Amino acid sequence: MHLRHSLKKTVLMAIAACTALLPATQASAQKVDFAGKRILVTVPFAPGGGSDVYIRALQPFLEKHLPGKPTIIVLNVPGARSIPGANRFQERAVADGTHAVVISATTVGSFVFERSRVKFALDKWVPVLLSPQGVVVYSTPALGLRGPKDITRLKGQSLIFGGQNASSGEARTVISFELLGLKPKYVWGMNRGPVRLAFERNELNINYDSMPGYLGAASKLVKAGKAVPLYSMGITDTRGVLVRDPNMPDLPHVGEAYELMFGKKPSGPAFDAWQSVNKMMTMLNKGIFLPAGTPKPVVEAWRAAVAGILKDPEFEKHAAQVIEGYPQFIGEAAIPIIKDATSFKPEAWAWLKNYFKTDHNLTIE
């Protein structure tokens, strides 16, 4: 009950911070009318995935809160790392409020790391809503750890970690290992479900889960004494400061884990690279965007609708599953996060390119 109350308070505080300027735009937003119209929302992933679940949970509330109560049509366009669907949206979307796109961390990663295949300009799209999603790293108790304060015991241990590849959604976790001086053996080509099963079979001894997976399946392993939570990625708050994950307030974030490991605060190109990747993978984990050039009153109508959704008592019943207690960034509040996540400091980018090539034989563009 206390955690649920805390999550609700976090969401409501974030809504207040991100929507403080919205009342001044209500008049122009109310001039927009989508009555009788169909709004096409592109999801560049197959049905049933995280981005699809995200928008389908929001779908009835968008129909309720957008002016004129339009019909929302969800179009799934699956393909490699969401590139085909995002490219299609870039090429075909009409900038009149009747076309929107849902992005995920994978979409952002593709935009940053695979520029030769990308035709979409994510940094030019107009943000409506960003929904962060955190990560928890945990290990098997067989490594001799009982909690985060024992993290120094990981030094020199033979660690085994599985995932898709180093530049996918695993990047934030993989780089955190490098920051902490850990050198796991990596087993690539595995999705999160099979990875967790391999962990349960003791084939892997260190793992991570996104917050939905952790609060679901992985937390049961913790209760059964089969997993030990070590640290979260943390989130960037509305001031731009790295803070603890609101879903795991007693767990240190990566910066604090570094201090436990080395007795000092992290700094330098490696930490700067990790912070940009964490914003890419955590803070931009899910989001709704409109195409570049969408008229300001239409943009304001969308943002006002999202603000209304987040305050809707009916939506509150779904909030724990859809936004999981994280601060939600509406409109202009999202722009600094997008900038930091899609552009790196030169020294951080050089470090990241070298790290991926040297340690994982991956070339990023």
Image (cartoon, rainbow, N blue to C red):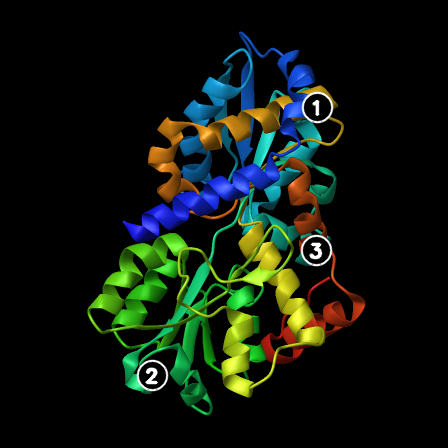
Task: Residue type at mark 1: give it.
Answer: Ala
Q: Quadrant of residue 194?
A: bottom left
Question: Quick one: label 2 or label 3, which is nearer the N terminus?
Answer: 2
Question: Quick one: label 2 or label 1, which is nearer the N terminus?
Answer: 1
- Position above or below: 354 against 86: below
- Kindly identify the residue that appears in the image at 33 percent across and 48 percent down: 4
The residue labelled by disc 3 is 340
- Which part of the image, by quadrant, shows the C terminus? bottom right
Q: Residue furthest right?
A: 346
Q: Secondary structure at mark 1?
A: loop
Q: Secondary structure at mark 3?
A: helix
Where is residue 136? Give x, y as percent: 42, 64
Marks 2, 1: nearer the viewer: 2
The residue labelled by disc 2 is 145
Give the camera-side residue of 100 and 327. 327
The residue labelled by disc 1 is 95
